[in-house]
């Protein structure tokens, strides 16, 4: 039986021991190399493209000769205005990418000796970078589509005589008209996953809203595999639709949605095993994290760390998470 990639030595190319033994200077040079890959880490002005710089020394800041702007390796990126050292950031990201089913903010807070609030913002900024990597990506080839429900559990009443059996047919018919069988927190996560390619996902109130999302993110003429739910019929004019009835078979004649189900399985393990509770407005970020893990699951932890740092350095300042706790306190 073949060994799983995560169990092999090839998957372990980076460790916390190596990160902290190499020190702050090596971590900083790694940031420069990933921020400016075209010049092997030599600074380039993002405003005018100038490569002639003065090294101001203190705080590792630069001043460009042409436009006289002052800049650092993290300026204008998700890491901007942060107080953590480069080696601390690399160590935290290494822990983040090593966690196969996600990392809780409480655990990161203890491992890196930071406040719980700091850990939450650090990880959500990383998830923003993960989301940005597929924001404009369109899928082609063979794509699987599916949806799954999250949250929306209705707690039964304390007294037995006040409880409602929501499984009864009469109540379900009434509920279908009034939506009284679910809470307002219910969300449907829709995933589109390309075989051998990328995974894109987004939460909606109803799975039928994912039809427009699919039209936007899948190239015309692509083969789309989905189950027998009626709203996917609307994609028939634009795509080569192949359907599978899961009440009869999970896979038949090469038609299946196992890649999509694999994504939902990882996301359920992440939320149920690590995060325990995820609000609907943040489900998109956690789903993007699970999709990123699925897409890069065969890479080594060193490759995933470099990929995430490079993506974060290529992403602008997060307007959602910069100053998050200050806004909450206001």
Image (spheres, rainbow, N blue to C red):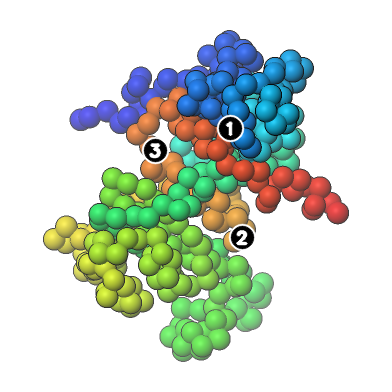
Farthest top residue in view = 21
How far apart in space, not on screen, are marks 3 and 1 (Cα)?
Answer: 32 Å
Residue 301 in the image: x percent, y percent?
44, 27
Q: In the displayed structure, does residue 107 sit left or right of residue 131?
A: right
Q: Is residue 106 visible?
A: no
Check disc 3 and report the residue beneath it: 296
Secondary structure beneath label 2: helix
Q: Say which residue appears at 64% left-offset and 81% top-offset.
A: 162
Residue 36 in the image: x percent, y percent?
53, 27
Instruction: Classify the position of the N terminus by image quarter.
Output: top left
Check if mark 2's residue and mark 3's residue have beta carbons within 8 Å.
Answer: no
Check disc 2 and report the residue beneath it: 281
Q: Earlier in the sequence, mark 2 or mark 3?
A: 2
Q: Say which residue appears at 31% left-offset and 73% top-offset.
A: 235
Compared to 72, does 122 lie above or below?
below
Question: On residue 49, which mark appears?
Answer: 1
Q: Is residue 9 visible?
A: yes
- For label 1, count other residues whose C-alpha is less than 10 Å away and answer few (under 14), some (14-19) or many (20+): few
Q: Earlier in the sequence, mark 3 or mark 1?
A: 1
Residue 215: name its quadrant.
Answer: bottom left
Residue 165 in the image: x percent, y percent?
52, 79
Secondary structure beneath label 1: loop
Compared to 16, does 300 lie above or below?
below
- For label 2, count other residues whose C-alpha is less than 10 Å away and answer few (under 14), some (14-19) or many (20+): few
Compared to 169, does 26 lie above or below?
above
Question: On residue 20, which mark appears?
Answer: none
Farthest right residue in view = 330
Foreground: disc 1 or disc 2 = 1
How far apart in space, not on screen, are marks 1 and 2 (Cα)?
Answer: 38 Å
Q: Say which residue appears at 46% left-offset and 37% top-offset.
A: 100
């Amino acid at each position: 039986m073949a060994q799983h990639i995560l169990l092999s030595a090839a998957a372990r190319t980076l460790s916390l021991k190596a990160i902290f033994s190499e020190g702050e200077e090596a971590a900083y040079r790694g940031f420069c190399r990933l921020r400016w890959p075209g010049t092997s880490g030599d600074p380039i002005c993002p405003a005018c493209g100038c490569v002639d710089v003065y090294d101001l020394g203190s705080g590792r800041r630069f001043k460009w000769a042409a436009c006289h702007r002052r800049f650092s390796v993290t300026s204008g990126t998700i890491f901007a205005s942060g107080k953590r050292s480069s080696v601390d950031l690399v160590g935290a990201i290494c822990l983040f990418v090593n966690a196969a089913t996600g990392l809780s903010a409480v655990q990161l807070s203890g491992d890196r000796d930071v406040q719980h609030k700091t850990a939450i913002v650090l990880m959500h900024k990383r998830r923003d970078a993960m989301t940005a990597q597929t924001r404009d990506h369109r899928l082609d080839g063979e794509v699987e589509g599916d949806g799954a429900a999250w949250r929306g559990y209705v707690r039964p009443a304390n007294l037995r005589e006040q409880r409602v059996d929501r499984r009864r047919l009469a109540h379900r018919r009434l509920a279908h008209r009034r939506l009284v069988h679910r809470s307002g927190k219910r969300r449907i996560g829709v995933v589109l996953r390309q075989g051998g390619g990328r995974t894109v996902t987004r939460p909606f109130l109803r799975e039928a809203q994912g039809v427009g999302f699919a039209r936007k993110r899948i190239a015309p003429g692509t083969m789309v595999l989905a189950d027998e739910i009626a709203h996917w019929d609307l994609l028939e004019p634009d795509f080569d639709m192949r359907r599978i009835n899961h009440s009869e078979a999970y896979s038949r004649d090469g038609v299946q949605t196992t890649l999509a189900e694999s994504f939902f399985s990882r996301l359920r393990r992440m939320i149920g095993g690590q995060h325990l509770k995820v609000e609907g407005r943040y489900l998109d970020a956690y789903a993007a994290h699970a999709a990123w893990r699925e897409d890069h699951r065969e890479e080594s932890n060193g490759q995933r760390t470099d990929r995430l740092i490079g993506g974060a350095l290529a992403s602008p300042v997060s307007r959602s998470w910069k100053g998050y706790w200050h806004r909450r306190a206001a």
